[in-house]
Image (tube, rainbow, N blue to C red):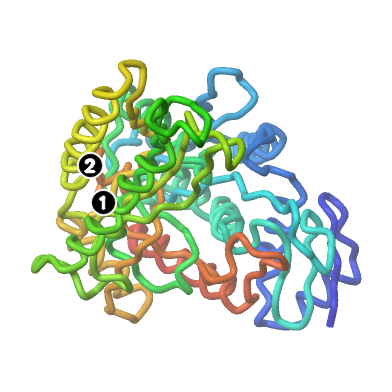
């Protein structure tokens, strides 16, 4: 079966086909279709999507808080369903967090329009289907019921929705949400980040830091090498040092076997330099990333790397004073720890029926929440293996599982009859 649904254009026949199969959660699929229809690639604005969700929330009688980037072309959305009948009962509670941006589709060979949801068989295809508009769709489907329970005085803890921008380019939006929450005096008890985990519980992830290293040498004719300082040669020495350091940290005794890669990693990703074979190069740049286990930090590797840079720069400057090496940090996302989330883990295990704890190498906004003192886990529909690829998809069964999970979560926040 193949169904194509465009943004704001769901026809009755498709609705009937979905509704006729109990495995297909129609409302969440409608919402996911709607969200995919907004091109929120990180280099573009996400305001159309945010304003659409804002209007939906306001129709439900909720007050929406937006925080913008500097150019005002992107926004985070934060909205609270208060506990009980008291609109001021917004402190504590649980945050459901998701990012609205997606990665580009440039150069990818898609079988269909990536910004037009299409169902083939038991999967829904589209950019962001699993990473991570599927989770956002399920939370928006749940929202009217949460509001109904709140107005009836049956919600015993507030629910907060936090939808961010620019997660895919360094988790730039979440810190603004967290600063706004703090400024308003809201202290959530827990957070669930709905990144794709096949609805299993991820309790920790590595941090990531990205660095650019610029080696400034001195040009000369290649027949007169002593008159120059070869930027590529010195860069290669530093790259070799980074590789050796990576091997050292992989052999530490405090590695964590619960991670798929049980040690912190260093990896050189790009390198460029030189203009011609017969010219001693005056510039070489390379980038590397460091993905640290939660109990390690950036200083564990950056301090020795800076020491090596100082040693190499001294050698270069002994030959020419205008040479040297600079290290620039381009991205930093903290690791997510599991040290304070035991109660939340117990709740998630009860709701999913699966007590297995997972730890992953990829980074999310979860580390920013834990750094702010909010115990956090990751649990959402879809597989991370489908993220960022052509023909990205989420299995409809995963959306159904997420819907069921959120219904149980809402029940856990509800006062009994």
Residue furthest toward the front? 223
Tell me: 122 left or right of 227: right
Label 2 crowding class (10 Å Cα cut-off): few <14, some 14-19, many 20+?
some
Residue at x-position 54% and y-position 35%: 62
The answer, for residue 94, to whether it is visible in the render is no
| Closer-to-camera residue (53/235) | 235
- Residue 260, how many percent across, how many down? 32, 73
Residue at x-position 85% and y-position 77%: 2
Mark 2 touching mark 1, by CB under 8 A?
yes
For label 1, the residue is 241
- Residue 176, how many percent across, how many down? 42, 28
Tell me: 119 left or right of 153: right
Instruction: Specify the label residue 305 is tagged with.
Output: 2
Q: Quadrant of the C terminus?
A: bottom left
* 109 to 258, vertically: above or below: above
Where residue 186 sits, quadrant-wise, is top left
* 159 to 255, vertically: above or below: above
| Closer-to-camera residue (130/226) | 226
């Amino acid at each position: 079966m193949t169904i194509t649904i465009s943004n704001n254009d769901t026809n009755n026949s498709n609705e009937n086909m979905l509704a006729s199969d109990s495995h297909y959660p129609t409302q969440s699929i409608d919402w996911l279709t709607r969200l995919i229809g907004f091109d929120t690639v990180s280099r573009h604005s996400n305001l159309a999507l945010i304003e659409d969700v804002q209007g939906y929330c306001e129709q439900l009688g909720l007050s929406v808080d937006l925080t913008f980037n500097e150019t005002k072309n992107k926004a985070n959305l934060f909205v609270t369903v208060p506990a009980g009948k008291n609109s001021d009962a917004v402190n504590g509670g649980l945050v459901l967090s998701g990012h609205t941006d997606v990665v580009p589709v440039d150069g990818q060979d898609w079988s269909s329009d990536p910004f037009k949801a299409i169902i083939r068989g038991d999967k829904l295809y589209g950019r962001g289907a699993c990473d991570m508009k599927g989770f956002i769709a399920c939370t928006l489907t749940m929202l009217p019921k949460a509001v109904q329970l709140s107005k009836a005085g049956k919600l015993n803890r507030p629910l907060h929705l936090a939808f961010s921008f620019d997660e895919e380019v360094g988790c730039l939006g979440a810190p603004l949400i967290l600063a706004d929450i703090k400024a308003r005096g809201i202290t959530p008890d827990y957070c669930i980040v709905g990144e794709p985990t096949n609805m299993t519980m991820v309790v920790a992830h590595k941090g990531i830091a990205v660095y650019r290293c610029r080696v400034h040498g001195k040009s000369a004719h290649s027949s007169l090498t002593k008159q120059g300082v070869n930027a590529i040669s010195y860069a290669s020495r530093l790259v070799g040092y980074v590789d050796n350091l990576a091997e050292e940290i992989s052999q530490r005794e405090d590695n964590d076997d619960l991670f798929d890669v049980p040690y912190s990693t260093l990896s050189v990703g790009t390198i460029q330099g030189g203009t011609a074979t017969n010219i001693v190069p005056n510039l070489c740049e390379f980038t590397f990333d460091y993905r640290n286990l939660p109990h390690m930090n950036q200083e564990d590797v950056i301090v020795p790397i800076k020491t090596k840079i100082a040693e190499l720069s001294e050698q270069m400057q002994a030959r020419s004073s205008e040479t040297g090496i600079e290290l620039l940090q381009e991205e930093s996302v903290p690791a997510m720890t599991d040290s304070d989330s035991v109660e939340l883990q117990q709740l998630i295990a009860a709701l999913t029926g699966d007590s297995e704890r997972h730890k992953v190498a990829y980074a999310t906004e979860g580390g920013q929440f834990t750094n702010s003192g909010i115990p956090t886990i990751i649990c959402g529909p879809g597989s991370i293996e489908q993220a960022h690829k052509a023909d990205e998809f989420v299995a409809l069964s995963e959306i159904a599982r997420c819907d069921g999970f959120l219904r149980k979560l809402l029940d856990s926040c509800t006062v009994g009859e």
